């Protein structure tokens, strides 16, 4: 999404969904994953007569409340959306003005959409022509329409194409930057968005600054740390700018060199140590490989409130350390919700027994590893203090430094005030009254200055920049193939000094774009561009002139740096349709994909997987469990709801394999692994697919390893991990595992 | 042998109290049961049970509890007991085994009937622990009874089959309404005893089964499905059956006690020593007497 | 004096089978695992257009049939319609279960030798005959939230506010508003109300 229009986050808010007239949900299950948030969907249905359309491989709880349901074959969302666009363009339902002024590259999309006739779409996706036409008509004609997605769309080998296709659909319908519209990706935990914004990933500095020298230098300055010292922490300069391993494939870093394993480029060494902090290791595909990697590490440290499954999954006997980390109730700080709003989380109880909050664990490590001063200096800079107060000073440090997503306004004082006064905000519009009048709840970023109101709806040009409006970001240059990439005439946010498209603001172009003159002292202090402007002058001036600091450009349907310039359909690496694999093959193998040579084509063509593994494998969530289930399976009543690992299987499919309701069955994966689970008859899945929840762990390929838990720490419910049988497959850009599009073979146990 | 067989089966039955992981009452059936309750084409067992239990059962129990003994009290005063001489030959009627089994049944019944009444009238005892223990005793004594009932059923089955004598016996009501001593048409067992036998054994087995259903409550042995009704309806039907049959059992139980302990002096001896008085048999079981005479047993 | 008449209402257009009510109730009253005073039941699972869920517990009926059939008369009905019972009088006979249209009474297997214990059911968070908010009341019946002026915890925890409880006037008002704004798919009366309330 970031590659389409600049920011890769939910564009509207949950409450805003109540303004929608049509809600289309691809690969998400908010009734299960966001039960409280789903109330907004239901209210929209109830009060706004909104039509809910669900496109999902199985009849989920969300689909039960939907008006239209398309039971799609996993991994075929792009043909479906092209099918919708085909019908939209044919009938002229697209928003022509919007496309003209604010989107680049729609001609190529039109050409591709022409190929996807409803008949072809029916063949590839399994959704009938009539239903496709019905859904398209309802969605295109009931505006504003909002598009919801989650893991079902992103966790594919073409996930990065999927997440471009959905914005393109919304752009063509003119559903962006309006109340009740937008692309709303529903993030999971209460601070997943926050973790994403801080980029706890291996390919960028916090705030999406990337790993270029310019960014490193900016951070060095902002942290008060010597740039050369930072450089010296790496083996050589090259590695300072190189992406690291991903969570999906770190195991290759350990196993490389063994026969059959992917090669790596890791400065000539394998990974030796693993430090896990609050992560369910069993939530990654290829569990058998993860286990092997754990066994081959020299050091494993696991910091979690409950015993991490990695501890019992591995056979490693020595050098496995479990650190008790404090839970969310025993620590405080800012958390960022899925709609980019921040709330302040207050500590409710002091850390119990010997558990320590995460930051304390990290500070203690920093002390012992010798860089505590450098590590914590950033918190002292703003007020030139001698000692810091955690977490308030950390929050203020973030606000001081991160400008790319406009966190300047996120001072700890403001965030606390909002949380303390959450009753003063409207649940749909997020507007505040009384002492918080003129502000939006939680100050959804970007919050350009310390007094800015927050931006609840991204790319909304019907509001002034001061009130949270903005156009699309100018992130991809000024021209491409001779076409101007800036927005069209009169398509700037309301009350803007510059009514047309304009580039992102730099020290060089600020006077011209804003139509102002800088004083000499301002010229001396101003930063190179809006992202690294420590003086905040650019942001201030922009607010005065109604200009968005990041520019006003067109969103692009064409991403010329990607292997597929416009999103193209490619069959999942393990596809049940070998005929379609020939027509829509996957990518070529990618070398040094986050340091690992990742297979694509060679895996897909290794053999005709559909012969031996004819059943689609779908994974998903249960309402009473979370992630790897570490916490919830240790809770009595939650575990009692689903005490055993199971597999939802269609009675017809089960009968063909002699499996009765409640029988044990094996699920075999193309990688040679297998799990033993209980069969549960369900009509929510078709005859060509099965569904398994991924919250269980403790069993491994039929073996019960729960005896390995330290005394008194075994959870109430243990079972097989779904990720033991999820297939080898990774997104071409992000290396996200293809857990939502795989194959398996079932057998009675 | 038969005794052991039955004991074995009884224990197996009780130990397979394996509660299916899927509750037959509290899972998805709950909604269908709500829809069914009081519906046009349903069995209406729910409302029926409520009506019977809240308005009629306790009245009928009370009626039988007071009425039957009262009637016999009157009979004793007006007609009086039958007395037979104890000087004649003693006729061997019941073996040790039969007497022991009967004794087990006696103990069982003596616990079951009063505790059952305590449950039915629980509120007058203030409820609580005493009545709860009464309920548990009611169930324990049932086990005792289950051990006795099968052998009893088998060894007296032939003797208790209806004959033409029984019709004649019915017409004169066994001769108990007159003080005369005359020959009554009856085999080893008269029609009255036969009625009691069938009610106590077959009826008793039904009581055991219905009682077990109510005790186990949430089981899945396919029984409800066999009848094509839901588990809760099965339980309601069993509750109604158990109560209604209890009226019959109770009434005949009181009768049997009166007959064996009061109406015929010394009759109880046949269950203690195993021997009946010759005169008693000659008059009250005349057909049997004739048969014994023919077979030269006397 | 006009007392409120407390009623439960579960809107199956909003119930998503999240089981929040079930878990909240079990947690608040520290119930043994296996007793679910409140349960979410789903019919036609997996069939599009037909699947629906609703949350069932004791409906606290007018003329409660359980109260009518109890042989030890252990039930008592409060002025506000909440039906409660005395666990110390109960003998665990099961008649209330047979009488109940909603399957609300449950019997934990915690008697001697795993026999059926005394009856347990939803109290609408109103405790029992013991002294209000005493330790004994909490142990036998769970929390008494009504005495503290709080809403029963199941409705308080409902994610989508499908389950609401309160005075019948208020609940009916909410029901009517929802029905009116939906404008379609209206059922005659809330589920079970025709059986529970006269």
Image: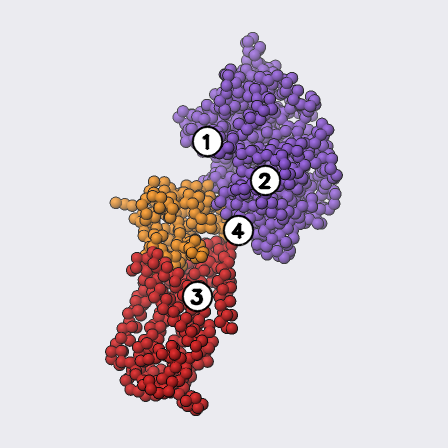
How would you rate the neighbour count of disc 1 (Cα within 10 Å): few for under 14, some for 14-19, many for 20 or more?
few
What is the quadrant of residue A269 in the picture? top right
Q: Chain of mark 4?
A: C
Residue at the farthest top position = A520
Q: Which mark is residue C45?
A: 4
Colour scheme: by chain
Q: Is residue A212 above or below residue A583?
A: above
1 or 4: mark nearer the eye: 1
Earlier along the polypeptide chain: callout 1 or callout 2?
2
| Rendering coords of residue B33 (x, y %) | 44, 57
How would you rate the neighbour count of disc 4 (Cα within 10 Å): few for under 14, some for 14-19, many for 20 or more?
some
Tag 2's secondary structure?
loop
Q: Is residue C17 above or below residue B252?
A: above
Q: Which mark is residue B143?
A: 3
How would you rate the neighbour count of disc 2 (Cα within 10 Å): few for under 14, some for 14-19, many for 20 or more?
many
| Rendering coords of residue A50 (x, y %) | 50, 40
The hue used for chain B is red
Q: CA distance from mark 4 to mark 2?
A: 32 Å
Q: Residue tagged by mark 2?
A: A309
Q: Residue tagged by mark 1?
A: A350
The hue used for chain C is orange
The hue used for chain A is purple
* Tags 4 and 2 touching, CB below 8 Å: no
What is the quadrant of residue B181 in the picture? bottom left
Q: CA distance from mark 1 to mark 2?
A: 26 Å
* Tags 3 and 4 touching, CB below 8 Å: no
2 or 3: mark nearer the eye: 3
């Amino acid at each position: 999404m970031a590659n389409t229009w600049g920011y890769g986050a939910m564009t509207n808010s949950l409450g805003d969904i109540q303004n929608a007239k049509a809600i289309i949900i691809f690969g998400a299950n908010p009734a299960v994953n966001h039960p409280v948030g789903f109330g907004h969907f239901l209210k929209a249905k109830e009060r706004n007569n909104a039509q809910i359309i669900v496109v999902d491989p199985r009849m989920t709880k969300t689909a039960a409340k939907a008006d239209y349901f398309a039971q799609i074959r996993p991994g075929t969302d792009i043909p479906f959306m092209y099918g919708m666009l085909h019908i939209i363009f044919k009938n002229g339902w697209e928003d022509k003005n919007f496309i003209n002024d604010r989107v680049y590259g729609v001609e190529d999309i039109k050409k591709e959409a022409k190929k996807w006739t409803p008949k072809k779409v029916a063949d590839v996706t399994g959704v009938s022509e009539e239903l496709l036409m019905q859904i398209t008509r309802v969605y295109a004609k009931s505006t504003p329409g909002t598009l919801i997605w989650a893991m079902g769309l992103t966790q594919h080998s073409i996930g990065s194409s999927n997440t471009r296709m959905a914005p393109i659909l919304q752009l063509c319908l003119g559903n962006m930057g309006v109340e009740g519209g937008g692309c709303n990706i529903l993030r999971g935990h209460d601070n997943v968005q926050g973790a994403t914004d801080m980029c706890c990933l291996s390919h960028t500095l916090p705030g999406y600054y990337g790993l270029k020298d310019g960014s490193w230098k900016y951070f060095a300055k902002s942290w008060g740390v010597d740039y050369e010292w930072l450089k010296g922490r790496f083996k050589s300069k090259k590695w300072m700018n190189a992406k690291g391993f991903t969570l999906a494939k770190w195991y290759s870093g350990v196993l490389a060199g063994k026969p059959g394993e992917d090669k790596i480029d890791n400065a000539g060494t394998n990974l030796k140590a693993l430090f896990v902090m609050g992560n369910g290791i069993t939530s990654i595909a290829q569990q058998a490989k993860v286990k092997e990697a754990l066994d081959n590490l020299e050091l494993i440290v696991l910091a979690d409130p409950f015993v991490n499954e990695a501890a019992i999954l591995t056979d490693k006997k020595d050098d496995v350390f479990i650190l008790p980390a404090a839970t969310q109730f025993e620590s405080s700080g800012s958390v960022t919700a899925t709609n980019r709003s921040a709330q302040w989380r207050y500590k409710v109880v002091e850390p119990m027994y010997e558990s320590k909050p995460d930051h304390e664990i990290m500070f203690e490590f920093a002390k012992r590893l010798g860089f505590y001063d450098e590590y914590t200096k950033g918190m002292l800079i703003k007020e030139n203090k001698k000692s810091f107060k955690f977490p308030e000073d950390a929050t203020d440090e973030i606000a001081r430094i991160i400008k790319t997503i406009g966190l300047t306004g996120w001072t700890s004082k403001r965030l606390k005030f909002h949380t303390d006064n959450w009753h003063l905000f409207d649940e749909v519009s997020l507007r505040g009254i009384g002492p918080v009048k003129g502000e939006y709840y939680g100050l959804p970023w970007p919050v350009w200055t310390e007094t800015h109101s927050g931006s609840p709806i991204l790319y909304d040009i019907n509001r002034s920049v001061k009130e949270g409006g903005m156009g699309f970001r100018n992130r991809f240059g000024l021209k491409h193939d001779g076409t101007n990439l800036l927005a069209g005439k009169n398509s700037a946010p309301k009350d803007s000094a510059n009514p047309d498209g304009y580039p992102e603001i730099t020290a060089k172009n600020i006077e011209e774009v804003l139509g102002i003159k800088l004083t000499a002292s301002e010229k001396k202090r101003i930063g190179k561009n809006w992202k690294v402007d420590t003086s905040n002058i650019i942001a201030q001036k922009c607010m005065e002139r109604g200009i968005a600091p990041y520019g006003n450009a067109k969103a692009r349907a064409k991403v010329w740096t990607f292997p597929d310039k416009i999103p193209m359909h490619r069959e999942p690496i393990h596809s049940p349709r070998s005929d379609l694999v020939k027509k829509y093959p996957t990518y070529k193998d990618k070398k040094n994909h986050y340091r690992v040579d990742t297979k694509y084509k060679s895996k897909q063509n290794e053999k005709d997987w559909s012969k031996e593994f004819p059943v689609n494998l779908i994974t998903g969530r249960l309402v009473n469990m979370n992630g790897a289930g570490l916490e919830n399976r240790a809770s009595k009543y939650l575990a009692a709801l689903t005490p055993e690992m199971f597999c939802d299987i269609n009675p017809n499919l089960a009968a063909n394999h002699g499996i009765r309701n409640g029988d044990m069955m094996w699920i075999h994966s193309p990688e040679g692994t297998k799990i033993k689970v209980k069969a549960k008859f369900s009509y929510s899945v078709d005859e060509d697919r099965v569904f398994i929840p991924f919250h269980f762990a403790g069993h491994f390929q039929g073996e019960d390893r729960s005896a390995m838990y330290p005394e008194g720490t075994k959870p109430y419910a243990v079972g097989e991990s779904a990720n033991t049988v999820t297939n080898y497959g990774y997104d071409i850009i992000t290396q996200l595992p293809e857990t939502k599009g795989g194959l398996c073979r079932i057998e009675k146990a | 042998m038969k005794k052991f067989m039955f004991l074995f089966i009884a224990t197996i039955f009780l130990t397979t109290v394996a509660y299916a992981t899927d509750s037959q009452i509290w899972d998805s059936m709950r909604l269908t049961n709500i829809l069914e309750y009081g519906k046009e084409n349903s069995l209406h067992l729910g409302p029926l049970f409520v009506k019977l239990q809240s308005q009629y059962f306790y009245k009928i129990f009370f009626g039988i509890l007071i009425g039957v003994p009262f009637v016999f009290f009157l009979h004793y005063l007006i007609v009086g007991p039958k007395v037979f001489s104890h000087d004649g030959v003693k006729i061997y009627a019941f073996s040790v085994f039969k007497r022991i089994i009967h004794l087990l049944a006696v103990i069982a019944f003596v616990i079951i009937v009063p505790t059952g009444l305590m449950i039915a009238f629980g509120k007058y005892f203030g409820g609580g622990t005493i009545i709860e223990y009464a309920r548990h005793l009611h169930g324990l004594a049932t086990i005792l009874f289950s051990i006795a009932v099968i052998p009893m059923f088998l060894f007296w089955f032939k003797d208790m089959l209806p004959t033409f004598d029984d019709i004649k016996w019915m017409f004169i009501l066994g001769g108990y309404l007159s003080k005369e001593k005359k020959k009554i048409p009856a085999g080893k067992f008269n029609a009255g005893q036969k009625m009691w036998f069938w009610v106590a054994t077959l009826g008793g087995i039904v009581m055991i089964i219905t009682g077990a259903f109510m005790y186990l409550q949430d089981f899945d042995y396919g029984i409800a499905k066999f009848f094509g009704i839901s588990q809760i309806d099965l339980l309601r039907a069993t509750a109604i059956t158990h109560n209604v049959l209890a009226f019959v059992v109770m009434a005949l139980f009181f009768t049997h006690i009166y007959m064996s302990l009061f109406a015929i002096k010394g009759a109880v001896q046949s269950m203690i020593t195993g021997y009946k008085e010759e005169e008693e048999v000659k008059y009250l079981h005349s057909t049997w007497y004739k048969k014994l005479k023919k077979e030269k047993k006397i | 004096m006009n007392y409120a008449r407390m009623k439960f209402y579960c809107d199956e257009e909003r119930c998503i089978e999240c089981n929040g009510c079930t878990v909240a109730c079990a947690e608040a009253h520290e119930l043994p695992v296996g007793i679910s005073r409140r349960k979410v039941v789903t019919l036609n699972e997996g069939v599009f257009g037909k699947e629906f869920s609703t949350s069932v517990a004791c409906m606290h009926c007018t003329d409660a049939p359980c109260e009518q059939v109890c042989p030890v008369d252990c039930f008592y009905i409060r002025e506000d319609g909440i039906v409660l019972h005395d666990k110390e009088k109960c003998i665990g006979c099961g008649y209330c279960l047979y009488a109940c249209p909603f399957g609300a009474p449950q019997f934990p297997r915690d008697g001697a030798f795993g026999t059926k214990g005394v009856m347990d059911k939803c109290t609408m968070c109103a405790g029992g005959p013991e002294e209000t908010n005493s330790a004994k009341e909490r142990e036998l019946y769970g929390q008494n939230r009504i005495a503290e002026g709080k809403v029963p915890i199941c409705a308080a925890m409902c994610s989508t506010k499908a389950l609401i409880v309160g005075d019948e006037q208020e609940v009916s008002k909410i029901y009517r508003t929802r029905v009116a704004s939906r404008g379609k798919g209206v059922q005659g009366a809330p589920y079970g109300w025709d059986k529970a309330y006269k």
